[in-house]
Image: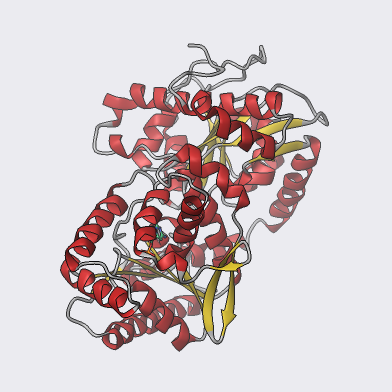
Amino acid sequence: MINIAIDGPSGAGKSTIAKKIAEKLGITYLDTGAMYRTVALYAVSSGKNPSSQEEVVPLLENIKISYEKVGGENRIFLNGKDVSEDIRMHNISKCASEVSKIPEVRAFLVEKQREIAKNNDVVLDGRDITSHVLPDTKYKFYLTATAEERANRRFKELSDKGQNVSYETILADIKDRDYNDMNRKVSPLVKTPDSIEIDSTNMTLDEVADAIMEHIKAIKEQCNTLTVYKNASVQDLRKEAKEFNIDANKVIKKKTKKKGGFYRFIAAIVRKAMGIIWPTKIYFKDNFPKNTKAIVVCNHYTALDPCVIISKLLGKDGKVLMKDEIMKNHVVAKVATELGCIPVKRGEADLSAVKSILGALAKNQPVLIFPEGTRNKSGSKEMLPLKQGVATFALKAKAPIVPLLYYKKTGPFKRNILIVGAPFYLDEYYDQKPNAVKEEVTEVIRDKMCRLRAELDILVEKCGGSKKKYFKYVKEHGKEIYGNERNGCKE
Ligand code: DC
């Protein structure tokens, strides 16, 4: 699949260019900004405040976004209604920027975007495509222009459509949205180091499109050169990839994966079996990010806990920390490695495990850690004190944290429930020394897990496991859940 990612601030010409590139290559175009606008439009027309997490999140389950080509043009539909024009209203731009700050909205839309990119050759434009939605793609562009030039273009576009908004208002709004988009906590707009930057201030659309096409051609050629080296050693491939400044992991993975086929086959069976041994209903599975680094934290009751997560959530690239005792048997060790286990020596600083964890995160792989460090044998809802290692990893790798919670302690073949919380970042701590803030960050993680516990208890105990009832409950008792109380979790 070819996935071309174009990020940049509002009004830089991304959608026009992305459309052109898609046309030239004969592939699909996906305007991810239109998705955020659609959610904003739904919130506004439902009389809700687009900046309010409590008001917007419950709406998500009622939103169906689809696309259709009408007269050769891509149209976007909200619950079956063509909203392609409505979402371009000036007031919706600001509201889209507001809803895009809400982690649940992002998780909801990112999931859809990745699904489309997985199955189609596609050009995507947005704010977080290169950094978050498709960090592995080789085709990354950052398209920008001065705020004044972008305001000029928007002013002309709106005037042509008969919308009367002054240049000054547009310029102020553009600056405001730039600030919002670049400074929000979740997936802010950034230029990733591997993106090619194009400043379109003094360029025509055709010049920008031609420049991007040239780069695409060059990247394609580089990749082909690399894949020719089928018999090259892994070291040679790495060297070559470094020279071309592209991610060699995919090419190398293909080579190394050829070995150990037998154990991989057994691991695939074990992975399936793990999902069957413990029939677990997973709520909010969509929150689980795909194809990206993440530290997955979960409460820990029994040895079965990793099974469901390995089988149903982590994917083949996922890693799990395990006691190194399981590696004593040669066959078990091989299968466990194929399942993504990273052995950890307990009770000592295991540098090799630390290296493996940071290495996996650097390769955009999710890592599952049980932050309590040991099983909660009493089976209480209250978690044991958290170890501080998770905080250190999250800060060092600048990785989002995905909280998971099992509802209770059960056993093999007994039904259980698992909830996936919205991923969160710790950006406000990234420029501080991990050692200085790890205690505080551990508290933040614990707090998020406690809130998730509160939500899970409500879902199960007050709403009988019905998501519909749960959303209704959230609407009526929002504060009770999202307030500052540590629901369901005592210190
Ligand atoms: O590209 P646009 O102006 O149509 O996007 C509308 C808003 O949606 C914008 O303020 C930022 C947000 N957005 C985002 O956060 N992530 C994306 N991938 C695309 C848009």
Q: Position of residue 133 (x, y in %)?
A: 46, 58
Q: Quadrant of residue 160?
A: bottom left
409 left or right of 454?
Answer: right
- 301, 288: nearer the viewer: 288
Q: Position of residue 143 (x, y in %)?
A: 29, 70
75 left or right of 87?
Answer: right
Q: Quadrant of residue 119?
A: bottom right
Q: Where 312 sits versus 306, above or below?
A: below
Q: Residue at x 71, y 48 (%)?
A: 267
Q: Where 200 sits versus 238, above or below?
A: below
Q: Position of residue 38 (x, y in %)?
A: 49, 60
- 453, 5: nearer the viewer: 453
Q: Position of residue 99 (x, y in %)?
A: 42, 49
Q: Where 407 sits versus 170, above or below?
A: above
Splitting the image into four quadrants, where does ligand 1 fall? bottom left
Q: State how the image is colored.
A: secondary structure
- 463, 247: nearer the viewer: 463
Q: Residue at x 46, y 42 (%)?
A: 356
Q: Where 335 sits versus 189, above or below?
A: above
Please indicate, yes or no, whether residue 478 appears anywhere in the rendered image: yes
Please indicate, yes or no, whether residue 333 appears anywhere in the rendered image: no
Q: Residue furthest right?
A: 413
**Which quadrant, please, contains the N terminus?**
bottom right
Q: How many marks?
A: 0
Q: Residue at x 37, y 27 (%)?
A: 441
